[in-house]
Image: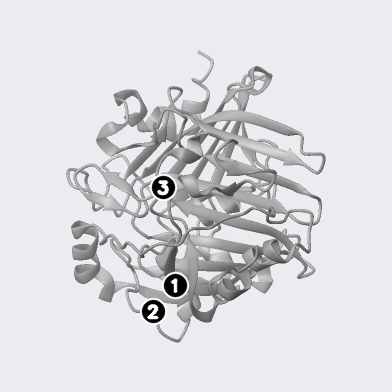
Amino acid sequence: MANWQQYRQFMPDGMQMLFEGKYFWKMPADVEMDVGATRLHPLPAGYLAATKKYASQAKILTLPDGGLLLKDYVAGIPFPDPQEPHRGWKTLVDVWYRYVPHLIADTPDNPVTLCSQNRYLNMACSKVIFVYRQLRHNTDPGVPMNLPSAGPRDYTEWVMVEEPEQLKYSALLTIFYQDLSHDEDAYAFIPRLRRTLRLSTASRCAPVFGSDFNPDDFRFGFNGNLTKFQAHFLGERKILAMINYNTEPGKFPSSFYMPLGWPQPSWGQWELRDVYVLDVRRIPAHSAGYCYGKRIMYVDKESLAPLWEDLYDSQMRLWKLYFLAPRARMVPGVGVEDVSGSEIVSLWDLVNPHATYAIFTDPQGHDVLINSQVPTQYHNIERYGTPGGLDEIMR
C-alpha cells in the first residue's frame, strides 16, 4: 500500500480503484505484489501454421441489424494484425478464436471450487465439474480440424454441480454454432423436475448457480454472440498480470488475501504484459434490456486472453470488476501455453457488495485435464454436448 501509486500506470482502472479503497471491496493494508520478469510462451506450432495458411481468407460482412459477421474462417488467428476498419471487432474475434485446447474438463476427482461471499463476509461454496469442447477449427496434434460429428456446431460448454447436495446434478449446456449469426442454444437440467428445459436466448444476464457470473462472462472472459456486439479499440497498454504461477491458489482461502480474494505472494510473481484495451458493447439493435452497458477488456497481446475487465451497467455506472489469471501449463503434445483451460478468476460486485471466486486447482496440486488426459467417458460428445445427454444425468 505504501508504494502502489508508483505502479498505477501498469494497473487496469479497476485495480487502481481497489487500491484507492473507494468501494466495499478494497486492497488489504498488508497486500504485497512481487513483480518478476515477463515470461512468454509461443503459441502452438499448429495454430501458427493455420494462421499463416488461412488468415487471408477471413472476411467481415455487415448484417441488416448493424452487426458484423465473420465469414470463411478456418483455423488459427483470424486477424493476426487487426487494423481499421473494425479494428476493435477484429480483435474481439481474435479473442473468441484464440488458442484453447480441443478438450478441457474438470471431473469429480478435481472439481472447480466456486465460492460466493456477501457484504457480511458469509461464504457459500460449491463444487462444479465441466466439459468444454472445440468441435471445429482444431489445431492440436491428433485431433481432426473439424470433428466428423460436429454438424453445424462449433463449441459446447457442459457444466454440472457436484456439491452441495441440494444442488447436485443441476447442469447447463450451451451450444455455439459455426454460423455466428445463429443464436447459441442453452439448456438447463433441473434435478427436482428430472427434465431438461430450453432457456431463452435473452437469458444471458441470469446469474449462473447463484454466482456473480452470467453466461456472457464464461469462456474465460467473454462468451457473447459476436454478431450482437461492437468493439472499439481504445489502445495498447502494459499491465501487471498473474499468469506463470503454481497451484497454491487451490488452497482457498488460505492462499488469498481475504476478504478481497486477492493473490498472495505464495502463488508466484506478477509480470508486465502488453495488452489491447477494448470497449465492448451490444449493438443498438440488441442493447435494450441487456445487463452490461459496456465491458472494458484488457486482452493479452501474446495469448489473446482477457486478463482484466471493468463491467458497467446499462446506465454506464461501474458495476463489477473481473480479475482473470489464466495459468500457464503444459498442454500434452503442444508445450507450455498461457491459455491451457486452467484459471483463477474473481468477480467483485461494487454496487451490491458481493463477490465470486472460481478456483480450478485443488490443495493437492491437481489441475484441469486437457485432451488425452481427459477420461474416456468425457469424450462422449452426445453425452456431454447434446440436450439428450442432459437427460441421462440421473439415470
Rendered image quadrant of residue 127: top right
Q: Give amino acid for label 2.
A: Pro
Q: Which residue is at the front of the view, 193 or 132?
A: 132
Question: Is 296 located above or below residue 137 in the figure?
Answer: below
Q: How is the image coloured?
A: one colour
Query: Label 2: few (<14), some or many (≥20) within 10 Å?
Result: some
> Residue 293, how many percent across, how many down?
71, 67
Examine the rendering and report whether any part of residue 223 can be seen: no
Callout 3 secondary element: strand
Instruction: Please state the horizontal and vertical placement of residue 93, each as a whole percent of the image.
Output: 44, 67
Callout 3: 10 Å neighbours few (<14), some, many (20+)?
many
Label 3 to label 1, Cα distance in Å?
A: 20 Å
Residue in the image at 42% along x and 39% along y: 247
Q: Are marks 2 and 3 in contact (CB under 8 Å)?
A: no
The residue pinned by badge 1 equals 91
Amino acid marked by disc 1 = Thr
Closer to us: mark 3 or mark 1? Answer: 1
**Kind of element beneath mark 2:** loop
Disc 2 marks which residue?
A: 82
Residue lying at 64% horizontally and 47% vertically, measured from the top left:
213
Q: Amino acid at mark 3?
A: Tyr
User: Callout 1: few (<14), some (14-19), or many (20+) C-alpha neighbours within 10 Å?
Assistant: many
Q: CA distance from mark 1 to mark 2?
A: 6 Å
Q: Which label sits on residue 24?
A: none
- Is label 1 in contact with label 2 (beta carbons under 8 Å)? yes
Question: What element does badge 1 sit on?
Answer: helix
Q: Please tell me whether residue 290 is drawn above or below residue 371 in the rendered image.
A: below
Q: Position of residue 36 (x, y in %)?
A: 40, 62
Please state if 376 lies on the left or on the right of 247 as rendered. left
Query: Which residue is denoted by mark 3 in the rendering?
Result: 155
Quadrant containing the N terminus in the rendered view: bottom right
Q: Residue furthest bottom?
A: 84
